[in-house]
Image (spheres, rainbow, N blue to C red):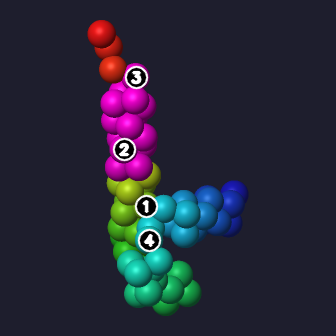
Amino acid sequence: MRGNVIESALLEIYRYVPPPLLEGFDPDKIDSIDEFLGWLAKARYIEELEADLITRAIVAAFPED
């Protein structure tokens, strides 16, 4: 189970964190779970930002009259 959780978190990190920010990311050299969770938190925050952008674009495309 633990491997699946880590793999899922890595997928999120690689999906949402932009490549320039990933230059310093090496999962094999992470010293603590806190550091790993920090990367996951960045990924989830960026995911939320993207969802908000999409929501605003939809609202702008279909304004209420």
**Type of residue at label 4?**
Pro
The disc label shown at residue 62, or none: 3
- On the image, numbered disc 4 is attached to which residue? 18
- Of tags 2 and 1, which is closer to the observer? 2
Name the element at disc 4: loop
**Type of residue at label 1?**
Ala
Instruction: Please determine whether, in this image, residue 25 is positioned above or below residue 6.
Output: below
Q: CA distance from mark 2 to mark 4?
A: 16 Å
Q: Do tag 2 and tag 3 residues touch (Cβ < 8 Å)?
A: no
Q: CA distance from mark 4 to mark 3?
A: 30 Å
The local crowd at label 4, few if under 14, some if 14 to 19, many if 20 or more residues have their Cα within 10 Å, is few
Which numbered disc flags the more N-terminal residue, 2 or 3?
A: 2
Residue 48 visible in image: no
Q: Which residues are magenta?
A: 49-62
- On the image, numbered disc 2 is attached to which residue? 53
The local crowd at label 1, few if under 14, some if 14 to 19, many if 20 or more residues have their Cα within 10 Å, is many
Q: Do tag 4 and tag 3 residues touch (Cβ < 8 Å)?
A: no
Query: Depth check: 39 or 33 in front?
Result: 39
Q: CA distance from mark 1 to mark 4?
A: 9 Å
